Amino acid sequence: MISEYNFVKRIVKDSERKFGGITFAYRTKPNNGWNICVNNARLYMTEDFNKFCIVWHKVSKRLGISIIFCYCDASENKLVKLSEDSSLILNCY
């Protein structure tokens, strides 16, 4: 069975490959779900991205992994803080 970390890493990679831009994921506490963030508000609002999210939500439910997709600014300061305070997944290529 795939680990939570590797599952979320796969989502981040797939998002970057399909849509471009920056995708990153983090969780602030070990028992919290994962926040999967895209830095493009227009992309976040598209039907294609919505379908992408629905597919990954179905898979995550089967695996018992909690995820949420959101739009987040990928500023350097924010990413540094997340890397210090949480499990950050970024730049998977």
Image (tube, rainbow, N blue to C red):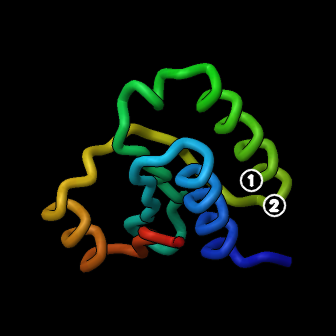
- Residue drawn at point x = 54 percent, y = 58 percent: 33
The residue that label 1 is drawn on is 60
Which residue is depicted at the point 59% across and 32% down?
Answer: 49
The reply to whether callout 2 and callout 1 are in contact (CB within 8 Å) is yes
Q: Residue at x 48, y 22 (%)?
A: 45
The image shows residue 8 at horizontal and vertical percentages of 61, 64
- Image position of 62 with respect to 83: above or below: above
Apparent side of residue 32 relative to residue 62 in the rendered image (left or right): left
Farthest-out residue, left = 77
Q: Amino acid at mark 2?
A: Leu
Rendered location of residue 25, percent (x, y): 46, 60
Observer-nearest of 54 and 91? 91
Where is residue 48? Give x, y as percent.
Answer: 64, 27
Q: Is residue 68 left or right of residue 87?
A: right
Residue 21 picture location, percent across and down: 41, 48
Describe the element under mark 2 as helix, strand or loop: helix
Determine whether the residue tagged by mark 1 lies in a helix, strand or loop: helix
Q: Residues within 10 Å of mark 1 (few under 14, many from 20)?
A: some
Q: CA distance from mark 2 to mark 1?
A: 5 Å
Q: To which residue does mark 2 refer?
A: 63
Which residue is pictured at 21% across the width and 72% down the height?
Answer: 80
